[in-house]
Image: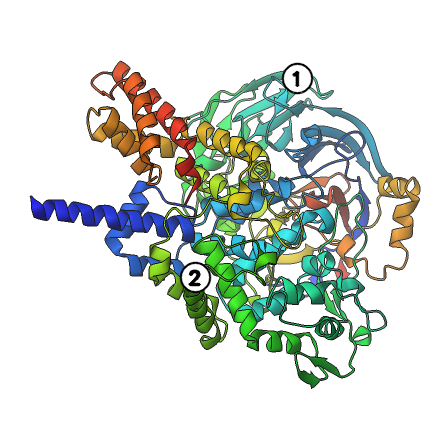
């Protein structure tokens, strides 16, 4: 189990801003389940939406810059035709900013160009080499190897960018190197593979060849559950750091620090490359620029907010699914159930804590 | 031969009784499950249902594939999807059936609450407490945010009493009409002043925020109150203690349990003027309720072991929720929830029981009132669509069992199919119609692939026909 990091901490973070707002159509997001961001802050956002509002299941493109968010475009839609998806899950970009999306229901990977034009899709449902069963996390290595979390087969598979099978690793279970319905993934230095091992409540890392390196975190919600609250069938408690409750997303920054979307603990945890706990983000959300614009056009909303003393419920993360690193050490969290992004910055100077 | 025949009759009876128990205390069971339970024994099965060790449906798994149901806001019907998933996949059928029972009594609806998440939180509370202590559950109910909003207790102030919650607590949740005065309603309501919902930011473009119970001491009426003949500085819990001590409460809850699990009673508003159909049964259940210090599990044990329960087979009309969930469990579903569960959760509503959205605080009118020409067609079409789909795992198991018995003539085919989807006890006229259909379609043979395919299709057609007979609507 990770221990709390004490002493001179050269890894401190500052809340920067909140971006986007809930919209099924147009300039907004709805259940943003994953996203990928370019070096010039263009974010391709995968909106899972709700099945009774299939128009909310789509990709939206935003600029998530330091000076605020800007909606650019929408592409992809709900359906089974080429270029459509039913359950879009995770997203990755290649060197040419082509966009790759996994679809858990259709068991396929769909490729678009950077402007959102459909290029191709591939994927065969099954359990044999090269077949997939509910593909989730996706990442592309420096050598253009495509890694996919093959969730129901409890493994990671490697393909080339056209879907040719290259290799696999992992199996079902809870031992080192095994998985239980894994979800998100990312690549670190030397293309080491980090996987959010969802039902084992941990993150595991591997070499690009699939050699197991480490496991971070312990299973269970942890903590003193006597004061836990049950809401929507889920038990929430203040879990100790280093413990995960169904981690969904993971990313690694240039220092090798690991960020984990700790889904049901409603937070993002930050770990050193060795797995020691650094800090957690539980949320500091404020009104985004797009949110303020919405309020301005709806005076009834402003009126309803008058007199509210405690805005904590509006600040906190709610079941975040993904976290990514953008340029200038910006940490961007998909606050999935609040339909927005919370953005932090990793400080450059050491701070005594 | 006589011994074999006697044993066979005994087995049929034990399966039939077990099927009755599982229809009432759960959502039915397939033949494999019935045989397993019958081998275990009736009393042991009752005890297993009362103190289950299996697993609830995996809500986290549901939300992984349907994250949109975490905050389903105002979408009609969609908010019930999580609960439908719970009912379809729980290994604790009685626990889930009790959720349905309490939802019928403590009926709270989306039409006013407009917050699915809070309604789901309420049924989750029923799941946690539904077989436990009734007094504790009433306290939890009084503090449940959805209920507080539903019955306006957030508008019940020291300076201005709102009687809605206080009235329904007495009329529909505990004692029934005729057992209290208008003054009691007012005094009861005074005791619940200050029981409200904590203020949260209003719903906005980041969706909604959870409600939580808050006791506002400064808004509570600490004056002396006289309630049901007792006087004191009563707060809400004191009132609930007094309510639980009333014989009328024991009889009211006993009658509800009888109506839900044993046989249809008149609608609740008629209870004050219409005696129970089985007063001795109500007395027994009420006595157990009181002597066990309001322990619902104890009352259920007495009920399921009683002769009046065992003899009440095929006397109740299935509720829409029982039709939908029972059918889905029978035909089998992947535990990983597929797309379309939102539409599935609306089906009971099409038949007249929109879960989490009852027509009023009185709940649904049950029994024969479930049936009208429209709702009957919805029932038949839904079940026929499901049972006619021979690709579904539960239907495949039925076909496999039939195939294992070799070639079957029309009468055997009808007999076995009725047995495997229930058993369903068909009357002579129904039997004749089913056999006529089976005769026209021809016997079941399995000698070649073509025979098997044709026989499988015949079974599907016959199961669809069975779904349409009157007897199928009873449990």
Q: Quadrant of residue B441?
A: top left
Residue B442: give x, y in percent of width and height: 27, 18
Q: Residue at x 32, y 57 (%)?
A: B45
Residue A21: give x, y in percent of width and height: 79, 40
Residue A216: give x, y in percent of width and height: 53, 52
Is residue B341 positioned above or below B292 on the image? above
Foreground residue among B161 and B218: B161
Q: Quadrant of residue B447?
A: top left
Q: Residue at x 74, y 36 (%)?
A: A29
Q: Farthest residue to the left: give it.
A: B1
Q: Are marks 2 and 1 in contact (CB under 8 Å)?
A: no
Q: Secondary structure at mark 2?
A: loop
Which mark, by number, is residue A118? 1
Q: Secondary structure at mark 1?
A: strand
Q: Is residue A213 in sight in this rendering? A: yes
Q: Residue at x 31, y 34 (%)?
A: B428
> Mark 2 falls within which chain?
B
């Amino acid at each position: 189990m990770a221990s709390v990091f004490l002493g001179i901490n050269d890894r401190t973070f500052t809340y920067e801003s909140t971006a986007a707002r809930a919209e099924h159509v147009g300039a907004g997001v709805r259940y943003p389940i994953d996203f990928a961001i370019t070096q010039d802050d263009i974010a391709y956002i995968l909106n899972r939406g709700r099945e009774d509002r299939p128009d909310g299941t789509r990709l939206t493109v935003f600029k998530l810059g330091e000076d605020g968010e800007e909606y650019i475009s929408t592409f992809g839609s709900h359906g089974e035709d080429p270029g459509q998806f039913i359950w879009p899950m995770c997203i990755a970009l290649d060197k040419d900013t082509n966009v790759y999306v996994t679809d858990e229901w259709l068991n396929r990977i769909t490729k678009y160009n950077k402007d959102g034009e459909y290029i191709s899709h591939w994927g065969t449902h099954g359990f044999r080499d090269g077949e997939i069963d509910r593909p989730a996390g996706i990442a592309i290595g420096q050598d253009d190897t495509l890694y996919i979390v093959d969730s129901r087969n409890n493994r990671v598979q490697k393909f080339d960018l056209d879907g040719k099978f290259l290799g696999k690793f992992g199996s079902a279970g809870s031992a080192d190197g095994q998985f239980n319905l894994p979800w998100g993934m990312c690549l670190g230095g030397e293309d080491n593979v980090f996987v959010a091992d969802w039902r084992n409540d941990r993150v595991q890392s591997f070499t690009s060849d699939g050699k197991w390196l480490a496991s971070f975190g312990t299973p269970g919600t942890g903590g003193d559950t006597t004061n836990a609250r049950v809401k929507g069938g889920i038990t929430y408690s203040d879990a100790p750091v280093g413990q995960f409750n169904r981690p969904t997303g993971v990313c690694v920054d240039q220092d090798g620090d690991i960020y984990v979307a700790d889904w049901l603990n409603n937070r993002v945890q930050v770990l050193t490359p060795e797995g020691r706990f650094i800090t957690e983000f539980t949320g500091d959300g404020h009104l985004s620029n797009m949110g303020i614009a919405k309020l301005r056009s709806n005076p009834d909303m402003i009126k309803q907010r008058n007199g509210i003393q405690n805005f904590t419920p509006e600040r906190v993360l709610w079941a975040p699914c993904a976290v990514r690193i953008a340029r200038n050490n910006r940490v961007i969290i998909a606050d999935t159930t609040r339909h927005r992004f919370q953005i932090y910055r990793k400080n450059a100077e050491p701070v005594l804590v | 031969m006589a011994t074999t025949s006697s044993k066979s009759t005994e087995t049929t009876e034990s399966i039939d009784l077990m099927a009755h128990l599982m229809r009432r205390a759960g959502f039915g069971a397939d033949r494999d499950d019935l045989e397993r339970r019958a081998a275990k024994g009736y009393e042991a099965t009752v005890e297993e249902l009362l103190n289950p060790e299996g697993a609830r449906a995996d809500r986290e798994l549901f939300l992984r594939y349907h994250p949109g149901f975490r905050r389903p806001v105002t979408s009609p019907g969609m908010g019930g999807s999580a609960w439908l998933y719970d009912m379809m996949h729980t290994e604790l059928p009685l626990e889930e059936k009790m959720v349905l029972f309490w939802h019928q009594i403590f009926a709270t609806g989306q039409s006013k609450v407009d917050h699915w998440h809070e309604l789901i939180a309420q049924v989750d509370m029923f799941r946690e407490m539904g077989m436990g202590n009734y007094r504790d559950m009433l306290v939890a109910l009084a503090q449940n945010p959805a209920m507080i909003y539903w019955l306006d207790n957030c508008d019940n102030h020291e300076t201005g009493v709102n009687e809605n919650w206080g009235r329904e607590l007495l009329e529909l949740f505990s004692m029934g009409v005729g057992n209290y005065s208008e003054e009691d309603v007012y005094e009861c309501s005074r005791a619940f002043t200050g029981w409200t919902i904590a203020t949260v930011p209003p719903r906005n473009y980041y969706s909604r925020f959870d409600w939580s119970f808050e006791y506002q001491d400064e808004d509570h009426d600490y004056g002396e109150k006289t309630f049901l003949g007792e006087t004191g500085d009563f707060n809400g819990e004191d009132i609930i203690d007094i309510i639980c001590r009333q014989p009328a409460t024991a009889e009211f809850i006993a009658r509800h349990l009888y109506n839900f699990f044993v046989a249809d009673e008149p609608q609740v508003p008629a209870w004050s003027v219409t005696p129970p159909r089985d007063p001795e049964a109500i007395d027994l259940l009420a006595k157990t309720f009181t002597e066990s210090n309001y322990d619902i599990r104890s009352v259920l044990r007495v009920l399921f072991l009683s002769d009046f329960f065992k003899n009440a087979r095929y006397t109740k009309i299935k509720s829409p929720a029982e039709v939908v969930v029972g059918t889905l469990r029978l035909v089998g579903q992947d535990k990983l929830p597929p797309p379309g569960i939102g539409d599935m959760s609306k089906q009971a509503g099409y038949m007249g029981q929109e879960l989490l959205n009852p027509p009023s605080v009185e709940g649904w009118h049950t029994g024969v009132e479930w049936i009208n020409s429209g709702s009957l067609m919805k029932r038949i079409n839904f079940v026929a669509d499901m049972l006619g789909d021979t690709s579904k795992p539960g239907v495949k198991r039925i076909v496999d069992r039939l195939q294992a018995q070799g070639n079957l003539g029309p009468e055997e085919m009808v007999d076995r199919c009725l047995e495997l989807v229930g058993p369903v006890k068909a009357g002579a006229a129904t039997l004749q119609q089913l056999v006529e259909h089976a005769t026209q379609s021809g016997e079941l043979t399995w000698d070649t692939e073509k025979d098997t395919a044709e026989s499988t299709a015949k079974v599907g057609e016959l199961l669809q026909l069975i779904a349409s007979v009157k007897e199928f609507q009873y449990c």
